[in-house]
């Protein structure tokens, strides 16, 4: 991390990242604070590259954002039976001292919130914190500077944690700059030639694909990317959750920021038109993302691959789409008398009700 990072105003790309983080916390905290769940006695937020909490102009960084969001749910914080733990780590001791001052300036009543400061190297701290994740709902926010910390081994350890959502930053363009350096490409098992063949605006998609390849085939875990452009560099977030509700909530935020593809703070499809190199994904060279998804959804319903509304729901999420992209297709297919399905749902809150049976899709 540059020593000057927090001595300057946050740039637009940093603000996009922080907005995604803030909006997800608004959806995540209430889920576990509002109702008692026997399997969750603790809520843990791990912010392990936390910084000072503010930039030079006072804009809130991730630790302050977490406390501001908890302040919005003050009534829940005061009445919940769940223990709330915030873990803030930075290897720079001065950053932690400044963060402590910035937190104290908030003047919040933190009676039910435990704040734990750590001044350690992430590699050494990470395994020490893992026992804290038991019997807890966890959110891991890893705002690393670069690419090296969320490697294959740590990623696999993270996705095995129960009731744990993951959000981490990665400088995807680093792979573009050093495609022949084994110390770079081996971090997540990238292929040097594939990197060279990938247009710069698609590099974060490729990074997401490589992380997805690390998930065991029998393991139910969803990932979603969000690409962030700064000049000719592409950075990004990778979000992961073992429950469809987490993935759905994150994707809803992404589509709120980017109504065209739900995955970038720039015109990732428009850029493809002016590049001489084709996209990494051949389908994207033929048609836009939403229309491609709609065609694929129709096809998989009609060939019997997707047999229920739950099948459709999971197919949409795993392809980066949400209910509002599914409903028009289903309505059109029903109106055209291609299918029959009674009272389907494509929202997690309805699909995952314990008493609810999947709605069968009948092909006519």
Image: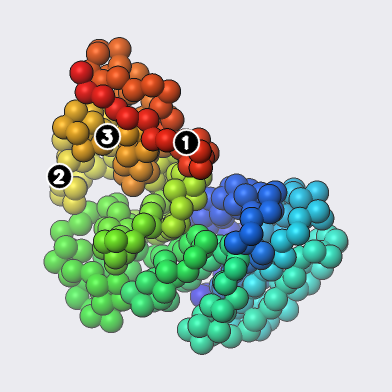
| Rendering coords of residue 221 (x, y %) | 38, 57
Mark 1–mark 3 Cα distance, whole angstroms, equals 16 Å
Secondary structure under tag 3 reads: loop
CB within 8 Å, label 2 to label 3: no
Near mark 2 (Cα within 10 A), the count class, few <14, some 14-19 or many ≥20, is: few
The secondary structure type at the circle numbered 2 is helix
Which residue lies under the disc numbered 3? Answer: 307
Regarding residue 8, the answer to whether it shows in the image is no
Calculate the distance from the C-alpha at mark 1 to the C-alpha at mark 2. Answer: 39 Å
Q: Which residue is mark 2?
A: 282
Residue 27, placed above or below residue 232:
above
Q: Quadrant of residue 209?
A: bottom left
Residue 104: which numbered mark, if any? none
Question: In the image, what residue occupies the spot 57% across and 72% down?
Answer: 134
SS at mark 1 in the image: loop
Looking at the image, is mark 2 or mark 3 nearer the viewer?
3
**Residue 342 in sight from this viewpoint:** yes
Residue 235 picture quarter: bottom left
Q: Position of residue 36 (x, y in %)?
A: 68, 54
Residue appearing at x 15%, y 49% in the figure:
277
Residue 356's label in the rendered image is 1
Give left or right: position of 285 versus 27. Answer: left
Q: Position of residue 151 (x, y in %)?
A: 36, 75
Distance from Cα at disc 2 to Cα at disc 3: 27 Å
Above/below status of 127 relative to 114:
below
Between disc 1 and disc 3, the foreground one is 1
Task: Tell me the crowding category of disc 1: few under 14, some 14 to 19, or many 20 or more residues within 10 angstroms, Cα based.
Answer: few
Q: Residue at x 23, y 79 (%)?
A: 181
């Amino acid at each position: 991390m540059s020593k000057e990072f927090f001595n300057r105003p946050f740039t637009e790309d940093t603000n996009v990242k922080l907005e995604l983080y803030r909006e997800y916390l608004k959806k995540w905290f209430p889920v576990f604070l509002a109702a008692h769940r026997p399997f969750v006695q603790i809520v843990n937020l791990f912010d392990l590259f936390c910084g000072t909490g503010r930039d030079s102009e006072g804009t809130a960084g991730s630790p302050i954002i977490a406390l501001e969001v908890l302040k919005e749910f003050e009534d829940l914080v005061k009445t919940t039976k769940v223990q709330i733990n915030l873990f803030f780590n930075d290897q720079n001791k001065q950053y932690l001292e400044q963060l402590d001052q910035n937190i104290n300036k908030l003047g919040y009543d933190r009676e039910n919130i435990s704040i734990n400061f750590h001044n350690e190297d992430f590699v050494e701290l990470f395994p020490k914190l893992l026992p804290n994740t038991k019997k807890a709902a966890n959110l891991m926010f890893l705002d690393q500077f670069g690419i090296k910390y969320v490697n294959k081994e740590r990623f696999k350890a993270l996705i095995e944690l129960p009731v744990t959502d993951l959000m981490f930053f990665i400088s995807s363009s680093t792979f573009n700059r050093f495609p022949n350096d084994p110390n770079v490409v081996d971090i997540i098992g990238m292929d040097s030639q594939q990197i060279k063949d990938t247009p710069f605006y698609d590099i974060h998609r490729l990074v997401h694909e490589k992380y997805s390849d690390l998930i065991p085939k029998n393991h139910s875990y969803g990932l979603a990317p969000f690409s962030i452009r700064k000049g000719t560099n592409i950075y990004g977030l990778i979000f992961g959750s073992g429950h469809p509700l987490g993935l759905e909530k994150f994707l809803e935020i992404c589509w709120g920021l980017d109504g065209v593809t739900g995955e970038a703070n720039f015109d990732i499809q428009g850029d493809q038109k002016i590049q001489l190199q084709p996209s990494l994904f051949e389908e994207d060279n033929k048609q836009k993302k939403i229309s491609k998804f709609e065609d694929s959804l129709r096809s998989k319903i009609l060939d019997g691959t997707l047999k229920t509304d739950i099948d459709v729901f999971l197919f949409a999420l795993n392809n980066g789409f949400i209910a509002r992209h599914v409903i028009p297709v289903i309505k059109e297919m029903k109106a055209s008398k291609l299918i029959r399905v009674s009272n389907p749902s494509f929202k997690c809150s309805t699909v995952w009700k314990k008493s609810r049976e999947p709605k069968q899709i009948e092909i006519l």
